[in-house]
Each structure stands twice: as C-alpha cells, then as structure tokens.
Image (cartoon, rainbow, N blue to C red):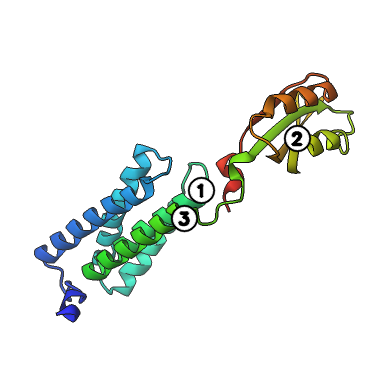
Amino acid sequence: MLNTLFNSVIGTLITLQSFLLCMAAALILGYLSALIYSFRNTYTKSFLVTLASLPAIVAVVIMMVNGNVGAGVAVAGTFSLVRFRSAQGTAREIGAIFLSMAIGLACGMGYIGFACLFTLIMALALLVYTFTNFGGRRNEEMLRQLRITVPEDLEYGEMFEDIFSEYTNEHRLLRVKTTNLGSLNRLTYEILLKKANTEKALIDALRVRNGNLEISCGLLGDDAREL
C-alpha cells in the first residue's frame, strides 16, 4: 500500500485526471509553503502569491517535458532568457523559492505522496529552527548599525575609539562612503551596545567629535545579516 501511495500517478501519456490531480496537489502544497514562509517573517502579498503559484507552474513545465530530451533543452533555453529586474533577495527568500520549485518538480513528476511528505518534513524543520532561534547571534537585540558623517579631512581611524570603548562591547567599520561631492565621509559601523537605551548618550558623545554633523543609529539591516 505504501509503495502504491508513493508511486508516480503519471504514465507515458498525461491524462486529464492525472493533470488535474497534480495541479491540485501543487496548488495546495504551494499554499502551504507560502504559509510556512509567512510565519514570523516580513513579506509582501506579491511574493506570497508567487510562492503559492510557483509549484503549479513548475509542475506544468515538467509534465510537458515528460522525458522528451529536445523539449527539456528548449525549456532550459527559455528559462535562461529570464532575468529578474528586482533587488537581490534575502537568503530566506531564495530558500523559499527553491522549496516551492522542489514541490513543483515532485508534483510534475507525479510523485504526489513524496511531495506531501517533503512539504511536511520541511515545515516541521523550519518551525523547529524558528522556535529554537537557530543561527541567532548572542545579544542580537543589542546590535545596532551606526552611521557617522565626518569632514573629508578628519582622520577618523582612532577618533571614536574611546567612545566606543565606553558604550559598546564590540564595534567594526563596515564601509566608508563619500558624500556631498566628496566634502564629507559617511562611516557605517556595526556595534554591540553594553546597555539598552544608551543610543542617545552615544550619539551626544559622537556629535562633539564629528562637528555636529549627521549621525544615525538603528537596528541592523537585513542586508547586513544575510549571507
């Protein structure tokens, strides 16, 4: 019975019944994969719709190829022409897309039982990783991204070391960017505060050193966390 459950429902020729069965399974599992991604994560409606519909799209492509080498080469060439014009996705977004594609591949090959089992295993694994804070950094709530604007001729190498020693446990310079036609430099630091709610005191101390130019302090951006 188990072997029958996990066998492919598609034969050499695709029937209307097998097509509808695979489409229904791909859409349902795609909806579940979108729900998995949305749990404790920021998202947009368009991205969730894409995740929910991607398994069905991939399943149709696989069913149409159906062992035909020439069709497979043609499909690969078509997909190679597709280029995404949007901003680079985060690691979690890329993983969610690959999850939806894997579900679609399994459904397109007719292995609906394996697709359901795979979705269930991945859902449980992602829930465990989320609830256990797997991969989280220690004292992550104290991490901040600090941007300091300084005059172009200021030697900033050791200028703020004593202030960082007083208010932070760790700090590192991420990037230096020129601004205002090269007359100013913008320094971006990743810092780990010693105590909560000390951002104002830190900024007040830094303003004395940088000539009261612009300073911003906020949560560490997702682009600095990914990959």
Residue at the outermost top position:
212
Measured in 3D between alpha carbons, the distance from the residue under mark 3 to the one under mark 1, in whole angstroms, is 21 Å
Percent position of residue 186, x then y? 75, 31
Q: Secondary structure at mark 3?
A: loop
Q: Nearer the viewer, mark 3 or mark 1?
A: 3
**Where is the N terminus found, in terms of image quarters?**
bottom left
Q: What residue type is disc 2 on?
A: Tyr
Observer-nearest of 92 and 217: 217
Residue occupied by mark 3: 132
Position of 204 with respect to 136 (left or right) is right
The residue drawn where x is 31% and y is 62% is 119
Q: What residue type is disc 3 on?
A: Thr
Measured in 3D between alpha carbons, the distance from the residue under mark 2 to the one under mark 1, in whole angstroms, is 31 Å
Residue occupied by mark 1: 90
Q: Nearer the viewer, mark 2 or mark 1?
A: 2
The residue drawn where x is 37% and y is 45% is 38
Q: Earlier in the sequence, mark 3 or mark 2?
A: 3
Residue occupied by mark 2: 167
Q: In the rendered image, is residue 173 in sight?
A: no
